[in-house]
Image: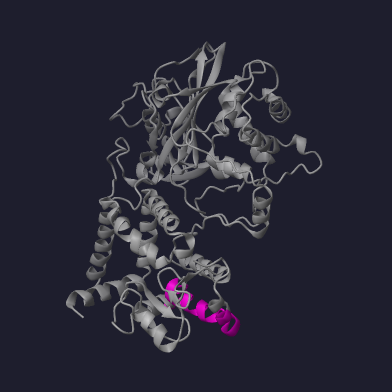
């Protein structure tokens, strides 16, 4: 594992342990719903299912087809906000050492 | 994709081993229901092959094995050991490698939902929202009634003119506004009212409103006659009986009061223990929607002792005339200035006020009669905020109508008027609510106290003879003018330019309780 990986692992472990990850997920979920991202993605998924037919579709296939677009359309202020929140948590965490 | 009852392989697995394996994995590694579980999850949720945390980490349902899906490690494990079922550790769904896809399973979903609620509560996140799923009974009902109403953006369903029964426009406009409260609509259209008048439901005002919602959403476009409602109001609020013109505001408050009395809260007997400083709340739908908490702080000018009380309110009446010169704070809109906007009025409403030497109050701290200041602030915001602009001035010498223009916004932020922001005891400069006390970091959700306008009631004419009309919002941003039986399309600009007598705002973000 590289240094980055190790650091990521430590931060992730902390976030999970204290429940911060779940809290962040809740905030993120809400922001994505509010921005309309989730509704748009739902429509996109429905389109994929309709195109392929219900019998020839798998979750993997839907993921493959919608992921690029889904990632690209996440509002940048939502991303920035999440990043700020993580930074703040990590900062507070390292201050308490 | 499989049907709602899972796949053959999962069913066989459940028959052999039950739901315990899933239950354990889910409560420890998907939705942690305890801090012990969180620690375990943090430590052990890594792919046993590549030591990474994903992408898409899965746990084998048959043995203790974690593998990521992204790099194919869980798939490899499944092939090698013939363990064909795995749980996705992010979402808790089960993947069957024999079917080659994720499978739905009612039983497991119910377990997952229970864990998620528990996990969320243990983190102080409040109730998780689950979208509506029809029960068996509801599916049967839906099958029997195949006609569906599709509501498009331009649909006019939910709009109905109301016949004027002779000076009853004050009632018509209030009904138009009440029927546009989304939470009330959902409450009544989902048939949640339990009538208290078992033997004579015709006496129940709530039943009548329930019937009106059915009428409004029936698709019928003919104007309605509200004679039953009028009669019920006459019997239950006797001061409004008779054929004279009435004040729409008075009618609104009387209606809420009667509705509140006729409502049975969903869990009145097991109401939660009153928390300190919180408004003692009834749980009926009217109080859930319209009740807010108003904090009053009386500060003794001698010892600076504060006595705080919180009282429930249904609406806020705002003065429009020049403010009396007894106000203590003189910056900003000084004494004597006339408010020109809703925000001005609210600013004035929540300003600390000097009670004067003629109104000395016994201070509970220094136990002497002293001059004091009084300040009102918003402790708890209601879902629907109703503002009453006091356009009718009654004094013993004259009655007159104040027709000055008061600007009101389409979107209103109530944050500046909240107790914790505005209160003089928090050492906040109460004259500058907009800038004072803004936290360095933006709050989690900055739109927390945002409201949007959904109904405006206007009075045209003089204090002796006049007419009420209402602007109401339909769908997200279509506006209509309701003038008794006539409903015409309107523009938001018309609405914002109108005089405004009663203003109804709806909270934009609702918390789950």
Q: Measured along the vertical axis of the image, is residue B111 above or below residue B235?
A: below
Find residue B462 and report its horizontal and vertical position in percent: 52, 11
Residue B35 visible in the shown view: no
Secondary structure character of the magenta stretch overall? helix
Nearer to us in this view, B358 or B299? B299
Answer left or right for B352 relative to B152.
Answer: left
Answer left or right for B205 relative to A52.
Answer: right
Q: Measured along the vertical axis of the image, is residue B264 above or below residue B389?
A: below
Q: Quadrant of residue B89?
A: bottom left
Going by the picture, which residue comes out furthest to the right? B199
Find residue B45 and report its horizontal and vertical position in percent: 36, 78
Q: Give the residue displayed 32% in from the left and 70% down from the top.
A: A15
Going by the picture, which residue comes out furthest to the left? A3
Q: Quadrant of residue B177?
A: top right
Find residue B113 and report its horizontal and vertical position in percent: 52, 66
- Decide whether residue B21 is among the magenta residues: yes
Nearer to us in this view, B355 or B106? B106
- Decide whether residue B428 is among the magenta residues: no
Find residue B121 and report its horizontal and vertical position in percent: 48, 64
Residue B498 visible in the shown view: yes
Q: Measured along the vertical axis of the image, is residue B240 above or below residue B474?
A: above
Tell me the magenta residue range: B12-36
Nearer to us in this view, B285 or B326? B285
Q: Give the residue displayed 34% in from the left and 24% down from the top.
A: B335
Q: Give the residue displayed 22% in from the left and 68% down from the top.
A: A95
């Amino acid at each position: 594992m590289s240094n980055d990986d190790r650091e990521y692992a430590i931060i992730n472990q902390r976030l999970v342990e204290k429940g911060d990850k779940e809290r962040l997920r809740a905030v993120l979920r809400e922001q994505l719903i509010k921005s309309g991202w989730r509704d748009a993605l739902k429509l996109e998924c429905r389109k994929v299912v309709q195109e392929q037919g219900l019998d020839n579709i798998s979750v993997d296939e839907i993921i493959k087809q919608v992921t690029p677009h889904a990632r690209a359309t996440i509002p940048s202020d939502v991303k920035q906000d999440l990043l700020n929140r993580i930074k703040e948590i990590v900062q507070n965490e390292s201050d308490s050492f | 994709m499989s049907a709602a009852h899972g796949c053959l392989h999962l069913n066989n697995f459940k028959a052999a081993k039950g739901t315990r394996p899933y239950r354990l994995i889910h409560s420890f590694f998907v939705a942690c229901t305890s801090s012990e579980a969180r620690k375990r999850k943090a430590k052990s949720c890594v792919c046993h092959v590549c030591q990474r945390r994903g992408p898409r980490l899965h746990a084998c349902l048959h043995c203790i094995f974690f593998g990521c899906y992204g790099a194919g490690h869980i798939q490899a494990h499944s092939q090698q050991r013939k363990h064909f079922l795995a749980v996705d550790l992010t979402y808790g769904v089960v993947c069957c490698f024999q079917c080659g896809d994720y499978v739905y399973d009612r039983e497991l979903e119910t377990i997952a939902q229970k864990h998620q609620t528990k996990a969320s509560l243990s983190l102080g996140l409040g109730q998780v929202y689950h979208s509506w799923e029809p029960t068996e009974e509801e599916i049967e009902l839906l099958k029997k009634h195949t006609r569906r109403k599709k509501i498009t953006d331009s649909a006019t369903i939910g709009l109905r003119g109301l016949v004027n029964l002779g000076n009853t426009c004050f009632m018509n406009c209030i009904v138009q506004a009440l029927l546009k409260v989304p939470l009330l609509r959902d409450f009544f259209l989902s048939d949640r009212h339990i009538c208290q008048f078992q033997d004579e439901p015709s006496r129940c005002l709530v039943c009548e409103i329930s019937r009106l919602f059915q009428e409004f959403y029936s698709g019928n476009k003919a104007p309605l006659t509200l004679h039953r409602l009028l009669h019920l109001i006459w019997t239950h609020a006797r001061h409004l009986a008779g054929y004279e013109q009435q004040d729409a505001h008075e009618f609104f408050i009387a209606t809420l009061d009667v509705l509140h009395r006729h409502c049975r809260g969903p869990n009145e007997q097991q109401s939660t223990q009153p928390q300190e400083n919180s408004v003692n709340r009834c749980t009926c739908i009217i109080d859930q929607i319209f009740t807010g908490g108003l904090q009053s702080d009386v500060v003794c000018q001698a010892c600076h002792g504060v006595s705080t009380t919180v009282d429930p309110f249904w609406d806020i009446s705002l003065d429009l005339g020049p403010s009396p010169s007894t106000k203590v704070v003189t910056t900003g809109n000084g004494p004597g200035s006339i408010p020109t906007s809703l925000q001005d009025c609210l600013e004035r409403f929540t300003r600390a006020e000097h009670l004067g030497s003629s109104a000395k109050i016994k201070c509970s701290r220094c136990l002497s009669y002293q001059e004091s200041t009084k300040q009102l602030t918003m402790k708890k915001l209601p879902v629907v905020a109703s503002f009453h602009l006091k356009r009718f001035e009654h004094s013993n010498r004259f009655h007159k109508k104040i027709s000055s223009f008061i600007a009101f916004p389409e979107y209103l932020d109530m944050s500046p008027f909240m107790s914790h922001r505005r209160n003089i005891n928090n050492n906040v400069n109460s004259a500058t609510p907009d800038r004072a006390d803004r936290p360095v970091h933006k709050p989690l959700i900055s739109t927390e106290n945002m409201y949007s306008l959904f109904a405006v009631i206007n009075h045209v004419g003089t204090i002796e003879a006049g007419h009420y009309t209402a602007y109401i919002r339909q769908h997200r941003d279509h506006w209509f003018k309701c003038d008794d039986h006539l409903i015409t399309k309107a523009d938001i600009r018309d609405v914002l330019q109108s005089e405004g007598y009663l203003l109804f705002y709806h909270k934009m973000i609702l918390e789950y309780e």
